[in-house]
Amino acid sequence: QVQLVESGGGLVQSGGSLKLSCVVSTNLFNLYDLAWYRQVPGKQRESIATISKSFTQTYLPAVEDRFIIFRDNDKKTLYLQMDNLKHEDTGVYYCNQPSYIPLSWPWGQGTQVTVAS
């Protein structure tokens, strides 16, 4: 059973930066496409960035010029560098396989990001 452990969230002022990490417990890490998701209370979890096993990145337009998704296959870790954070980026951030994969791994606990306006 693959486990996902997200970390790196916190409270930051508008315009600040955070770097999120997600450790994925699989020896086949390099074979998977991966994604970061964000969930705001009362709304569905949405995909905000994906990175393929060949390192192709895609982004939600709202974060495209501010966030960077990258991966370290040796460390089996997915990252999200978030710059110029806005209040609307507040939410719980999760990692998993992209939504185009029919069966996702069990969700981790997520990491809370709060951006003070």
Image: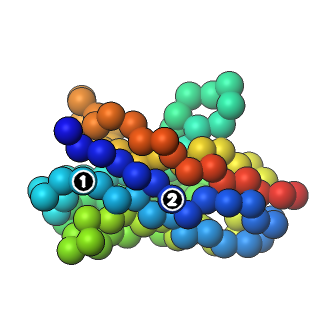
Q: Amino acid at mark 1?
A: Ser
Q: Residue at x 73, y 72 (%)?
A: 16
**Any mark on residue 7, and which?**
2
16 versus 28 height, above or below: below
Question: In this orientation, does residue 108 appear?
Answer: yes
Rendering coords of residue 94 (x, y %): 47, 46
Rendering coords of residue 100 (x, y %): 28, 37
Q: Is residue 39 left or right of residue 16?
A: left
Q: Residue at x 45, y 63 (%)?
A: 21
Question: Which color scheme is applied?
Answer: rainbow
Q: In front: 39, or 99? A: 39
Q: In front: 12, or 52? A: 12
Q: Secondary structure at mark 2?
A: strand
Spatial separation of the CA atoms under disc 1 and disc 2? 14 Å
- The residue pinned by badge 1 equals 25
Q: Amino acid at mark 2?
A: Ser
33 versus 19 height, above or below: above
